[in-house]
Amino acid sequence: MLVRGFTRARVPVLWVLLALLPFMLCQSDSHAQAVDRGTNTVKAVLNDPSTGTTLNLLAKITATGAVLAGTGDTNIPLYVVTRNGSTSNYAMLNLSGVTSCVMDATASNVRGEYVVASVTTAGRCHAQSAAPSNGIVVGTMEDNATTSGSPALIDSKIIAFVPGSGAGTGTVTSVGITPPPEYTVSNSPVVTANVMVWSKVNQNANLLYAGPASGSAAAPTFRAAVKADLPPQLASTGTVTPTALGGDVNDYANCTNGVCRINGQTTDRLVTGIVAGANGDLLFLRNVGTTNALTLKDESGSSTAANRFAFGGDITLFPKDSLILIYDTTLARWTPASTGIPDKYKIKSCVIGVGSVSADAPPLADDEDSPHACPNDFEKDWKITTVACMADAGTPTVNPILTAGAANSMLTGTGICTCGTGTWAACAVNGAPLVHTFSGTGATCSSPPCDISVNVTSAGGTAKFIQVKIKGVLQ
């Protein structure tokens, strides 16, 4: 038997060349190459060495080679594997033409339907009659029936499908846009090729972009701000001047958020509470009296709990004084909008003197002490920060203590401090000694100690007078 163009002796050489063709293709320096196989076009792509591909299933091309397609790979090109589905060598991927793909469902009368990647079984094909959403179309059905898990003939046409891009959807000759009134557009409509420019319209100063100032909902426009645009707690209701107070008041109801001008006439007045506001309401209190003071009582039981003030202490407004309050629903109290006090105003000092500077005065004795000195009437705890001592002569020693406290309740070690002669000598404070405050009339110490005692431990026989200076900061 003869093959045209070859002698009988040359026939084996032809078959050898044909047999070696796939391997010759695999030796190309490129990662993948197209091959014309009659009516089909295929591409040889190196298999991923881990996952690889499977014959008659869909594959995708990755940086590591051809990989079995997943159920979520609907927006990238996918190809049917027609030869060498494995984890080695080159897989042959079908680009166009009729080939076989394993289907994910059993169906009939499907010829001509769209073929897309299965979203239920990785790598399989799926036939559907409806046009797919944006994504990749693998091809169309050649067979008229499919069986789940079995291959069926499809016509590969790997294209991106965009709804409305097919025939019969009409012809668009120009594209334009009509913007809202606060914008302007140039170069609209576009007939051939151009760029539409979207810009903002200039607005007058001090206008805001908002819905209607009142009434039913409507499209936003630029307009002047009104009080209703602000949150309720910031929308001041203006200034009110209630009737002058005729006496002390509890649960005062004549102030709302805004400016409240209170006049107590000719007598100092107490205000124990103001009717509660909404969370965050701001209230500006002003004493417009000429001679009277207004005292806002802190946590007074004379007013309902939710109407009380939480100041940490009474606040007195003298004529022309003002105070900004803010209502806090978590605390259920009126609180000052600002309570920070500069440290320099928190510092309090006290000097305790023992003895006399009279020329006839004898030198101090060791038992000439000064008990219960420096009473704390500041209505806040007083933290001691420094102690110093000075004598008129000699070098006497003293032991200042928190009244009834231990010998080292104020100073380190044994609590003894040596006074300077004519100059102040610093004493070493032990930690942060705390002097609590007297309450009520100033005679009640609910949590001792509320004062300080100075004990003379060694007068020295020459000093007639000793001074101990104590400084601290209110807590």
Image (spheres, rainbow, N blue to C red):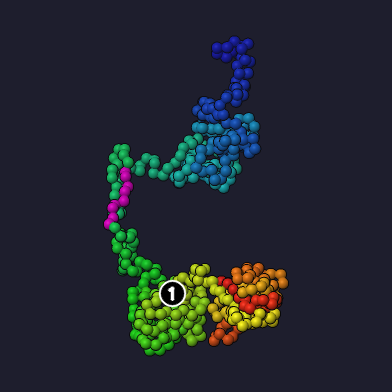
Provide residue 101's location: percent of width, then percent of height. Answer: 56, 38
Q: Is residue 109 above or below residue 1?
A: below
The residue located at (65%, 68%) in the rendering is 428
> Is residue 281 shown left or right of residue 411?
left
Work out which residue is located at the far right of the displayed protein and give it.
Answer: 414
Q: Please, which residue is most extreme toward the front here?
A: 359
Q: Taking the image as drawn, is residue 106 in sight?
A: no
Residue beneath the point at 31% across and 48% down: 199
Quarter of the figure that contains the N terminus: top right
Identify whether 278 is placed above or below 28: below
208 sits left or right of 328 in the view: left
* Quadrant of the frame with the C terminus: bottom right
Question: What span is colored magenta in the figure?
Answer: 196-204
Residue 203 counted in the magenta span:
yes
Residue 271 in the image: state x and y as whole percent: 44, 84
Residue 104: percent from left, percent from top: 57, 44
In the image: residue 337, left or right of residue 170 = right
The residue shown at (46%, 39%) is 160
Viewer-nearest residue: 10 or 364? 364
320 above or below 154?
below
Q: Residue at 63% x, 11% y: name it.
A: 9
Coordinates of residue 243 in the picture (x, y in percent): 34, 85
For the residue labelled by badge 1, is the local secondary structure a helix, a strand or a loop?
strand
Can residue 187 be seen here? The reply is yes
Residue under label 1: 325
Front position in the image: 254 or 144: 254
Under mark 1, the amino acid is Leu
Pick whichever, 226 or 69, lies toward us. Answer: 226
Q: Is residue 384 magenta?
A: no
Q: Quadrant of residue 373?
A: bottom right
